[in-house]
Every structure is written in structure tokens, then in C-alpha cells.
Amino acid sequence: MADANYPDDLLYHDQHDWARLEGDDHAVFGITWYAQDSLGEVVFYDGPEAGATIQKDSSYAEVESVKAVSDVIAPMSGEIVEVNDSLQDAPERINEDPYGEGWLVKVKLSSPTEAESLLAAAEYQKLLES
């Protein structure tokens, strides 16, 4: 398991998802350290298909752990351009490296201004404390 951390270069959704902006209209999404820790050992990732359209605040994937099945909520809207297929054979990467090899999808953003509604790392950590 990775140690608790919340990188400053990411934006956070209150449903425990993160977005790493790449350029003006692309982002990488994943789940936070808190989310993977709460789930426990991840045993299966059911991601979307490339080309699928996702909407901010809506479920776009499922992560299954030994404890539960949990929806993954989109922090922003857009079109899936790549899915981390390596998670099919190694879903534990979500636990081991949630911000690196455990990324879930890459997205072409349809509304890049939605980033303004996401939380900075310090704001997200305050949310976790409340």
C-alpha cells in the first residue's frame, strides 16, 4: 500500500477522485489515496470503453475490493481517450500507486472550466478531516 499523500499538482473531487490536467483540454483521472485505503485491497477494475462520454459527478467505472464494489465518479466531463488496461491484470496498482501506475483513464475534456469547481490538495485534506 502507498503512504497517505495528496499531491499538490492534482485537483480533487469531493467523492475522492483526482484529476491531473494535461494541457488545455486533457486530463488523467484516478481515485485518491483515501479512496483506495477505504476500499482495501482492490481486486478488480471495470473501466469504461475508449470513446465513451462521461459527465462530471456521474459514475463512469467500478472498483471492486475485498470489502465492496464502489462507483468511480468523474471529476470532470469529457470523452475517454485511453483506459489503463494494465489494471485488468494488476488492479493492485490502484492501491500501490494511486497517482502513478494506478491511474484509471485519460480524458479529452468537454468543459475545461469545470476544474474551477475542484479542490486543491489542502482543501481536500480539510474535507477529509471534517
Image (spheres, helix red, strand yellow):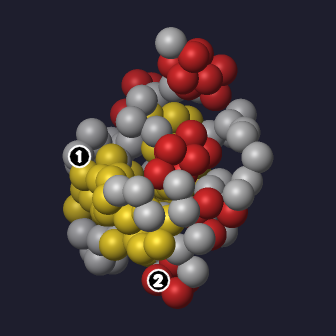
As drawn, is 37 to the left or to the right of 70? right
Q: Position of residue 72 (x, y in %)?
A: 35, 53
**Crowdedness of circle 1 by 10 Å Cα count: few (<14), some, many (20+)?**
some
Amino acid type, residue under disc 1 in the picture: Ser
Is residue 91 visible to the viewer in this orientation of the structure? yes
For the residues labelled 1 and 2, the Cα–Cα distance comes to 22 Å
Quick one: 115 or 46, which is closer to the camera?
46
- Number of marks present in the image shown: 2
**Circle nearer the N terminus (1, 2):** 1
As drawn, is 29 to the left or to the right of 5? left
- The vertical placement of 61 against 89, above or below, is above
Tell me if label 1 and label 2 are in contact, CB under 8 Å. no
**Secondary structure found at label 2:** helix
Q: Position of residue 114 (x, y in %)?
A: 37, 34
- The vertical placement of 16 against 59, above or below, is above
Q: Residue furthest front?
A: 67
**Quarter of the image where one finds residue 15:** top left
Q: Residue at x 62, y 69 (%)?
A: 93
Determine which residue is flagged by label 1: 58
Determine which residue is flagged by label 2: 88
Quick one: 43 or 67, which is closer to the camera?
67
- The vertical placement of 27 against 62, above or below, is above
Q: Quadrant of the N terminus?
A: bottom right
Amino acid type, residue under disc 2 in the picture: Gln
Q: Position of residue 28 (x, y in %)?
A: 52, 57
Front: mark 1 or 2: 2
As drawn, is 56 to the left or to the right of 108? left
